[in-house]
Image (spheres, rainbow, N blue to C red):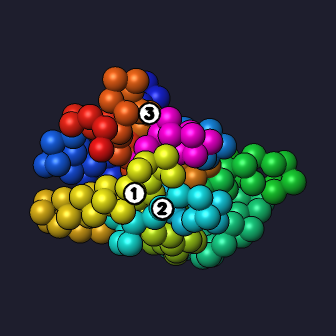
Amino acid sequence: VDKQGQPKGLLLDMLERLMEHNQRQWEVSSRQLASLLPNLFNGNTDLAMIIQHPVLARKATYGSKPVGRIVMKSYRLADREPVTHLEGFTGKRLIVLRGFGYGGAIEYFLDPAAGVKLVIAPDHLSAFEMLNREEGDYLLNYVGPAGEALLRFDNPQIVSETIKTEDIYFVVSPRIADPHKLLLELESGLKAINHSLIMAPDLHATPMAEHSVDKPASRPLSTGTGVLAAPKSAAGTE
């Protein structure tokens, strides 16, 4: 999310190109998972982009191909010990991005029992600058935005280890009459715009980092992404 709390990121950039190609209007909002699921189930949100979730898999329809991949990494200076799991941050100062839920891990870090001292960074570039100044022992970030920041902040002494990798898919509300038709349209559109798998950030400002798009009253069909975005149809109900 940006400083105004609005969703942003590589997946939303992709979604904008896709919806323009498919001639759909759309809206996006940022939601926590607890809010996203009921909105998908009741049809207020038509489409999301999200990782595999057992509840959604039973009630909604997932696309067949991932549209993005969340790769969470631990960044450090080369003289520090590597960390490859969340529990390894116990007793450490951990730099995290403001607004990131880290797939729910932020709740773990906020628990005093975890023994993690959080250091909040306002943006990706600042996070690496803070790591370089040793304001924190480690930085938790995602491959996509971290790579962009490192293009502007080149320090060979900064290395990383993977903490977690998960694929992101389109998922369609069970209230959509023909979800497979919609998914075919979306996945065909991705091919037409030469989409390649996005190494995405945690686009949610909340656990699971989701963005959802609400269906406007005047346009009953919307499509969405999960890191989550959902569009509203320019063509009306399908």
Q: Earlier in the sequence, mark 2 or mark 3?
A: 2
User: Viewed as shown, does residue 171 lie left or right of 79?
Assistant: left
- Would you name the residue on which mark 3 appears? 214
Residue 193's tag is none
Instruction: Locate residue 46, reporting x and y percent.
Output: 43, 44
Helix, strand, or loop for circle 1?
helix
Q: Is residue 187 or residue 136 the one in the foreground?
A: 187
Which residue is more in the foreground, 123 or 24?
24
Would you place residue 103 above or below residue 231 in this image?
A: below
Q: Residue at x 62, y 75 (%)?
A: 84
Q: Secondary structure at mark 3?
A: strand
Tell me which amino acid carries mark 2.
Answer: Thr
Mark 2 vs mark 3: give the one in front.
2
Return the disc, 3 or 1, that comes first in the chain's sequence: 1
In the rendered structure, does residue 48 fall within the stretch colored magenta?
yes
Q: CA distance from mark 3 to mark 1?
A: 17 Å
Residue count near mark 2 (Cα–Cα under 10 Å), binned few <14, some 14–19, many ≥20: some
Asked whether the beta carbons under mark 2 and mark 1 sit within 8 Å of each other, the answer is yes
The x, y position of residue 212, in whole percent, is 46, 41
Residue neighbourhood size for the residue with mark 1, other residues' Cα within 10 Å, grouped as few (<14), some (14–19), many (≥20): many
Counting from the top left corner in percent of width and height, residue 157 is at 42, 69
At label 3, which amino acid type do we have?
Asp
Distance in Å between CA atoms under marks 2 and 3:
17 Å
Residue 189 shows up from this direction: yes
What mark, if any, has residue 179 been given in the picture? 1
- Amino acid type shown at disc 1: Pro
The tag on residue 61 is: 2
For the N terminus, the quadrant is top left
**The C terminus is located in which quarter?**
top left
Q: Classify 10 Å Cα crowding around label 3: few (below 14), some (14-19), many (20 and above).
A: many
Identify the residue at horizontal 53%, vertical 45% (top origin).
40
